[in-house]
Image (cartoon, coloured by chain):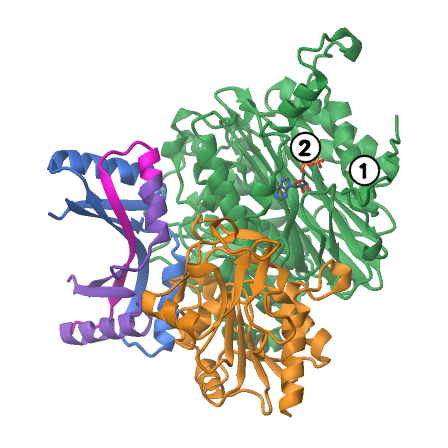
Chain colours: A orange, B purple, C green, D blue
């Protein structure tokens, strides 16, 4: 799997992401500066990591979404290429129009950093095939604006088309207000676009990939992508 | 030239921040507040003195960046 | 001279925090009346915050050496060797007064300042800690201050991208008017690639990097050394605003430039910005410095020399570059969208010369400016010995179980999860032990080594018996590190006390310091960096003596670290110690 | 009753957001923008119809919560 990590000024989880990708795919990802106008040849996966691109000033992800490299990402996605946006990356995807909706301030207005449980809603997508449908995984969140919102019509479509891949839940998989850490509509933690090749999610699977760090629940996402690409090849 | 662009949330879009402020004002004992919605203002200095040009630039700024027109409305005023 | 500069009067001198005898010293040193800008410079260099005039002679008693110490106190941060060619760079610093005036921005700029101290030396920051002291929870200002400070510490660290992995939070009525915000940063560097402040070579370009200069915090350093009174709200200087985004860019640009062999010396602009950094670079390198303020990037129009020299705008650095590498360095800074300007040159003259609009505004002997600050051996009296209370003499007021329940529900002792969950403590993917234990453990990139990090002090003990309290703070840091399996290596300290002009406060200071020195010597646990914050006093009431101790230890294999959670049912519980 | 409270940074206070937006507008090719400073607006609905009372409540809201008067100024307008 040849992956490319986009580096926007102010991004800060690119090293965490690179470590996870290297560990699981065996290949060092390419780091692509935001001012570039093309992606490295043969890229299989574009990753927008977490952080505070442009300080999260104006709106999270708004300024990064208008970077030169984003045209190349749009073309790549239109071609069916896989795009993964985590945390700030999710915000950038929403701001760029590659995903619908927006991430608002957390309902309690505070930054939150702790482990959360996510229910994997289906396993038949490149982004979830490393898991079973209904499986509960534990990964950390670290964000101040992860409260997913969209108009009713959009939410209805997301649900109807099975595009919600990850949802905040309890340790045993229940969905409800007490487990919905940031107030997101429908407890949404991660969604895909219509075509299913662009995923945006708030939690950080890349921080739970090593045994020695105590939890490896995040591995499945990356391992699934590797498996998907191997089969496609 | 000085101008102001005001960006506000469209009606119907949830405003968690406005809601929290509403709650906080109530618990601070500020009376009579029924609802709060938060928006942004941008005070912009423009080079040049052509009003029409300035308005076009401001509109471009708002459309391209300052507002997310999926959820926000904006208003442009050239002040002087 | 500038026509609009005010004449130098005794009132003006006093308003700069300079005592009459200190002013006499200036007159003798330069043989004439200083210009307005020069007066500002002296007041900045000679105030407590920069000159350590009340504390210096006592700090000399601290042990600062060990075979693993690469750099002790005196630089931007301390440096210790952790083997394999790697070094750990760390320091703690206070931002107490600004945080009381504007808690969010005070805390952000405190965190930003300490991070700069660490990456100025060539280290990538890998962890932050913070020690916070607030007033009584029921005091009307406390809630606002707590909310602002915690949000500010997180706001800066989270955005900059460093995990905040530990700290302390306490509440006591003696901090009602003077909260404490102590921030510690820890970075990792190659042991043979540490950068220092001393300039070398004549006629080398001095480069200004980072954000533009505004009128922020003018006289911030002087304020940090003044007692508060009820109208301190009126003395508000322009508050400094932190810009973690700019600092992140500055970090990446500095680390990139340091890879290129362009840099001779580097110094961050902290308190009294341009003044302190330029004087230190020159004085430490036995060189003079010529600055031309017309080249300084400014945010506002019409800034005077005085304002530019004393501005405390954040996210700025001064660097001495190899002249042939200027273009290469500039390209890196432009790429990161930061300001880059040559603002002066090193000279052989040992003078500090500042020009503005073609006029010489400052011409001072640079060495004396740095080293001839007054030095005080302030009178101190030992703290009164309190009677020893034996547990057997105290009648229990509550059944033990009820007392325990009550205790663990106090704001002081309850879980601080509500604080650290607002800090990103996992970013970097190296946090092995998260907040909540005795010490945090952070993996050294690519392992197997790990660092154990902790901040400790118990001010009650320090007040009851400064010597024992000082010892105890060091011992607790040592214990917390060993409890997670680390080998304690060195500490940084942040000495927060009241007004040193009161003999009883000075007595606390001296006592605590002796205790710290005794414990550090006994444990072979040297002090490699630190910070002193005095005058934490409002209307004559001082804070509890609070010498925060930040400890760093090493684990050869982080996977062997121990945590405090019980691991299984039916295991033995051992109690060790006295 | 409807009202608007506008909160802006005092002159001289650094505005990191404004600075970043300014840079972004330049790189997006929006011409003629010399400087940007960002502020907030609060659109507030008030119960009751007493204008003087409303103004007092708004002022209290701004002083206590909406503005950080150490670094920000505010302006209160009752709109209807
Ligand atoms: N301001 C803070 N930031 C991060 N972690 C904190 C903070 N305050 C307390 N903690 C964490 O809470 C735990 C308990 O702190 P403390 O009560 O000081 O413990 P102890 O006295 O046992 O060292 C520690 O792991 C500490 O790092």
In the rendered image, residue C34, in percent from the top left (x then y), is placed at 47, 42
- Residue A158 occupies quadrant: bottom left
* Mark 1 to mark 2 CA distance (whole Å): 17 Å
Q: Residue at x 18, y 47 (%)?
A: D3
Q: In the rendered structure, which segment of residues is drawn in magenta? A: B24-50
In the rendered image, residue A57, in percent from the top left (x then y), is placed at 41, 61
Query: Could you classify mark 2 by the number of other residues whose Cα lies within 10 Å: few (under 14), some (14-19), or many (20 or more)?
Result: many
**Element type at marker 1?**
helix
Q: Please report, as a chain letter, where disc 2 is located.
A: C
On whether residue C408 falls in the magenta region, the answer is no
| Closer-to-camera residue (B33/C514) | B33
Q: Is residue C438 left or right of residue C408?
A: right
**Element type at marker 2?**
strand
- Up the image or down, A220 lies above or below D14; here it is below
What mark, if any, has residue B61 been given in the picture?
A: none
What mark, if any, has residue C547 been given in the picture?
A: 2
- Residue C200 occupies quadrant: bottom right
Residue identified by numbered label 1: C479
Q: Please report, as a chain letter, where disc 1 is located.
A: C
* Quadrant containing ligand 1: top right
Q: Is residue C367 visible?
A: yes
CB contact under 8 Å: marks 1 and 2: no
Of the image marks 1 and 2, the number of the one nearer the N terminus: 1
On whether residue B31 falls in the magenta region, the answer is yes
């Amino acid at each position: 799997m040849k992956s490319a990590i986009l580096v926007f000024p102010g991004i800060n989880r690119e090293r965490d992401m690179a470590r996870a990708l290297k560990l699981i795919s065996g290949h060092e990802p390419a780091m692509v500066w935001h001012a570039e106008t093309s992606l490295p040849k043969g890229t299989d996966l574009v990753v927008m990591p977490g952080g505070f691109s442009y300080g999260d000033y104006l709106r999270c992800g708004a300024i990064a979404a208008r970077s030169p490299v984003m045209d190349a990402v749009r073309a790549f996605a239109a071609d069916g290429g896989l795009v993964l946006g985590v945390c700030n990356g999710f915000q950038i995807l929403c701001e760029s129009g590659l995903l619908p909706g927006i991430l608002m301030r957390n309902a309690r207005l505070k930054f939150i950093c702790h482990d959360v449980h996510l229910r994997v809603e289906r396993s038949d997508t490149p982004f979830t095939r490393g898991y079973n449908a209904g499986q509960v995984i534990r990964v950390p969140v670290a964000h101040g604006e992860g409260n997913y919102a969209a108009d009713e019509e959009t939410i209805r479509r997301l649900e109807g088309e099975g595009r919600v891949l990850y949802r905040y839940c309890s340790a045993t998989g229940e969905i409800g207000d007490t487990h919905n850490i940031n107030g997101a509509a429908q407890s949404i933690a991660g969604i895909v676009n219509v075509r299913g090749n662009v995923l945006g999610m708030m939690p950080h699977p890349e921080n739970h990939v090593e045994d020695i760090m105590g939890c490896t629940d995040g591995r499945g996402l990356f391992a699934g992508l590797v498996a998907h690409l191997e089969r496609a090849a | 030239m000085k101008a102001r662009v005001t960006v506000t949330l469209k009606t119907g879009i949830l405003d968690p921040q406005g809601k929290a402020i509403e709650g906080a004002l109530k618990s601070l004992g500020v009376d009579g507040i029924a609802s709060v919605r938060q928006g942004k203002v941008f005070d912009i200095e423009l080079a040049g003195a052509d009003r029409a040009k300035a308005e076009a630039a401001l509109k471009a700024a708002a459309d391209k960046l300052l507002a997310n027109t999926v959820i926000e409305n904006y208003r442009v005023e050239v002040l002087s | 001279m500038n026509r609009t500069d005010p004449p130098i009067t005794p009132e003006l001198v006093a308003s700069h925090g300079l005592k009459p005898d200190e002013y006499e010293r200036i007159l003798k040193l330069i043989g004439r009346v200083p210009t307005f800008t020069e007066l500002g410079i002296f007041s900045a260099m000679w105030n407590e915050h920069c000159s350590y005039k009340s504390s210096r002679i006592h700090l000399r008693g601290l042990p600062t050496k060990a075979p693993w110490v690469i750099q002790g106190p005196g630089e931007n941060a301390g440096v210790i060797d952790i083997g394999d060619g790697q070094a750990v760079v760390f320091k703690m610093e206070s931002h107490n007064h600004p945080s009381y005036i504007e808690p969010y921005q005070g805390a952000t700029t405190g965190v930003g300042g300490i991070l700069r101290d660490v990456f100025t030396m060539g280290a990538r920051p890998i962890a932050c800690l913070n020690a916070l002291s607030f007033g009584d929870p029921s005091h009307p200002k406390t809630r606002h201050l707590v909310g602002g400070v915690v949000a500010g510490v997180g706001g800066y660290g989270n955005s900059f991208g460093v995990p905040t992995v530990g700290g302390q939070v306490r509440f006591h009525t003696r901090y009602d008017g003077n909260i404490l915000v102590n921030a510690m940063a820890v970075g990792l560097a190659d042991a043979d690639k540490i950068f220092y402040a001393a300039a070398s070579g004549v006629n080398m370009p001095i480069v200004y990097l980072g954000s533009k200069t505004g009128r922020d915090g003018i006289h911030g350093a002087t304020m940090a050394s003044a007692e508060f009174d009820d109208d301190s709200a009126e003395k508000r200087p322009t508050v400094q605003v932190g810009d973690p985004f700019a600092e992140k860019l500055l970090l990446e640009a500095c680390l990139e430039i340091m890879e290129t062999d362009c840099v001779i010396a580097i110094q961050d602009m902290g308190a009294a910005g341009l003044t302190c950094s330029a004087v230190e670079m020159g004085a430490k390198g036995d060189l003079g410095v010529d600055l031309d303020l017309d080249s300084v990037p400014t945010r506002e129009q019409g800034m005077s020399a005085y304002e530019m020299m004393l501005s405390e705008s954040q996210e700025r650095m001064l660097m001495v570059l190899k002249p042939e590498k200027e273009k290469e360095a500039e390209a890196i800074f432009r790429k990161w969208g930061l300001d880059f300007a040559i603002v002066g040159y090193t000279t052989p003259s040992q003078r500090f010369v500042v020009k503005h609009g073609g006029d010489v505004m400052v011409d001072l002997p640079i060495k004396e400016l740095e080293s001839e600050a007054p030095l005080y051996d302030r009178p101190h009296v030992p703290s009164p010995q309190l009677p020893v209370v034996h547990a057997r003499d105290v009648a229990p007021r509550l059944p033990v179980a009820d007392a325990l329940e009550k205790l663990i529900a106090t704001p002081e002792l309850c879980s601080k999860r509500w604080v650290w969950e607002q800090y990103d403590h996992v970013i970097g993917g190296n946090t092995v032990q998260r907040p909540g234990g005795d010490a945090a453990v952070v993996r050294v990139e690519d392992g197997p080594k790990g660092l154990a990090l902790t901040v400790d002090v118990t001010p009650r003990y320090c007040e009851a018996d400064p010597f024992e309290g000082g010892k105890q703070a060091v011992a607790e840091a040592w214990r917390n590190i060993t409890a997670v399996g680390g080998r304690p290596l060195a500490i940084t300290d942040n000495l927060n006390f009241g007004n040193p002009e009161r003999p009883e406060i000075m007595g606390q200071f001296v006592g605590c310091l002796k205790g710290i020195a005794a414990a550090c010597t006994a444990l072979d646990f040297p002090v490699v960096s630190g910070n002193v914050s005095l005058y934490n006093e409002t209307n004559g009431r001082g804070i509890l003596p609070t010498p925060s101790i930040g400890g760093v230890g090493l684990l050869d294999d982080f996977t062997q670290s121990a945590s405090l959670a019980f691991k299984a049912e039916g295991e033995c519980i051992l109690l060790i110690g006295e």
